[in-house]
Image (cartoon, rainbow, N blue to C red):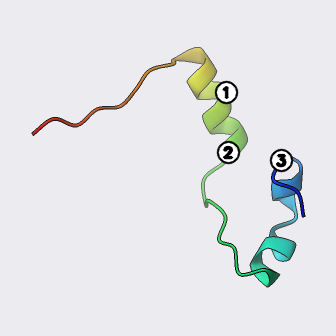
Amino acid sequence: MKLTLSGLKDREAFANAGISLPSYDVKQVVCETKKNPGWATSLS
């Protein structure tokens, strides 16, 4: 079990260890963030 992009593909190993992985496509989020970096803010 490795906490890397390729390691995240082994979802079963994480599940067996009781670790929940994100349901979104991490690789896609990385690509979008590189294209449009910035911080999301929420001000009330």
Return the disc, 2 or 3, that comes first in the chain's sequence.
3
Return the disc, 2 or 1, that comes first in the chain's sequence.
2
- Compared with residue 23, is residue 39 higher up or lower down, i.e. above or below? above
Residue 31's tag is 1
Return the disc, 3 or 1, that comes first in the chain's sequence.
3
- Distance, label 2 to label 1, CA atoms, is 9 Å
Q: Amino acid at mark 1?
A: Cys
- Compared with residue 41, is residue 38 higher up or lower down, i.e. above or below? above
The quarter holding residue 34 reads top right
Q: Quadrant of the C terminus?
A: top left
Q: Closer to the camera, 2 or 29?
A: 2
Would residue 40 be found to the left or right of residue 6 on screen?
left
The crowd level at tag 2 (other Cα within 10 Å; few <14, some 14-19, many 20+) is few
Q: Residue at x 88, y 54 (%)?
A: 7
Q: Residue at x 65, y 71 (%)?
A: 20
Q: Amino acid at mark 3?
A: Thr
Q: Amino acid at mark 2?
A: Val
- The label nearer to you, 3 versus 1, is 3
The crowd level at tag 3 (other Cα within 10 Å; few <14, some 14-19, many 20+) is few
Residue 13 percent location from the top left of the image: 86, 74
For label 3, the SS is loop
Residue 28 percent location from the top left of the image: 66, 37
Q: Closer to the camera, 16 or 26?
A: 16
Residue, disc 2: 26
> Quick one: which residue is furthest to the left in this view?
44
Q: Residue at x 28, y 32 (%)?
A: 41
For label 2, the SS is helix
The crowd level at tag 1 (other Cα within 10 Å; few <14, some 14-19, many 20+) is few
Residue, disc 3: 4
